[in-house]
Amino acid sequence: MSQYLSKEEIKQWRSSLEKITLEEYAKRLGKVLEEEKQTSDIIDIVMQNEKRLYTSRENKNVKQQVLKVAKKAQKTQDEMFVSMKEGSLAYVKSKITCKKQLTQREDAVLEHFAKNKGKIVFAKDLAAILDLPTDYVYKYIKNLRTKISENILENATKGGYVFNLPKN
């Protein structure tokens, strides 16, 4: 027998005419309520144990609190972005402007070029990263060249490509 209330037992409690709380009902049956589950919602991660804004109607500084929550959420999102990208593209994207948003694979190609700045990168290396045949990689290189405003991808004389940052 489970130590937690089942769905059927919760339905019985709801249909009961007795005026008792769910906790009291669980205690009467010798069971406990299931703990809250982990969440991946950004608002729940940021707010954690803080009082929810929508539960408090007496608060006069709602606008300031909303701004505080928004700043926390933005900070958390920025930290998550930097940790996902390992900081490598954060430096490169501040120097490069894109005409259109990059796809996930184009972003991976650009990240590899950024890690190997000034070195020759061959299509076979990119194919291994993207787990694609070499012929398909040229499409992503072509798309990068059209989406990036600056001319930073140059053909190497011995084959491959060289990534050079513009000098500001």
Image (spheres, rainbow, N blue to C red):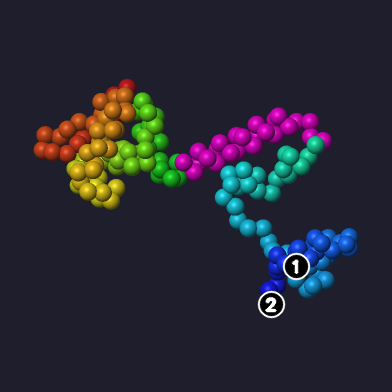
Magenta residues, start to end: 58-81
Res 87 quadrant in image:
top left
Q: Is residue 119 visible?
A: no
Which numbered circle lies on residue 90? none
Choose between 1 and 93: the one closer to the eye: 1
Quadrant location, the N terminus: bottom right
Question: Along the horizontal axis of the image, is 100 left or right of 13?
Answer: left
Quadrant location, the C terminus: top left
Main SS of the magenta segment?
Answer: helix
| 4 magenta-colored | no
Compared with 31, 88 (above or below) is above
Element carrying mark 2: loop
Give the residue type at disc 2. Answer: Met
| 72 magenta-colored | yes
Residue at the spot x=82%, y=62% of the render?
Answer: 15
Question: Along the horizontal axis of the image, is 56 left or right of 69?
Answer: right
Instruction: Tell me which numbered mark, 1 or 2, is placed earlier along the sequence.
Output: 2
Question: Along the horizontal axis of the image, is 126 left or right of 100?
Answer: left
Residue at the spot x=60%, y=56% of the render?
Answer: 38
Which numbered circle lies on residue 9? 1
Give the residue type at disc 1. Answer: Glu
Question: How far from the left and from the top, in percent, is residue 54?
Answer: 74, 39
Look at discs 1 and 2 and give the one toward the viewer: 1
Q: Is residue 130 visible?
A: yes
Q: Residues within 10 Å of mark 1 (few under 14, many from 20)?
A: some
Residue at the spot x=29%, y=47% of the render?
Answer: 130
Which numbered circle lies on residue 1? 2
Residue at the spot x=43%, y=45% of the render?
Answer: 84
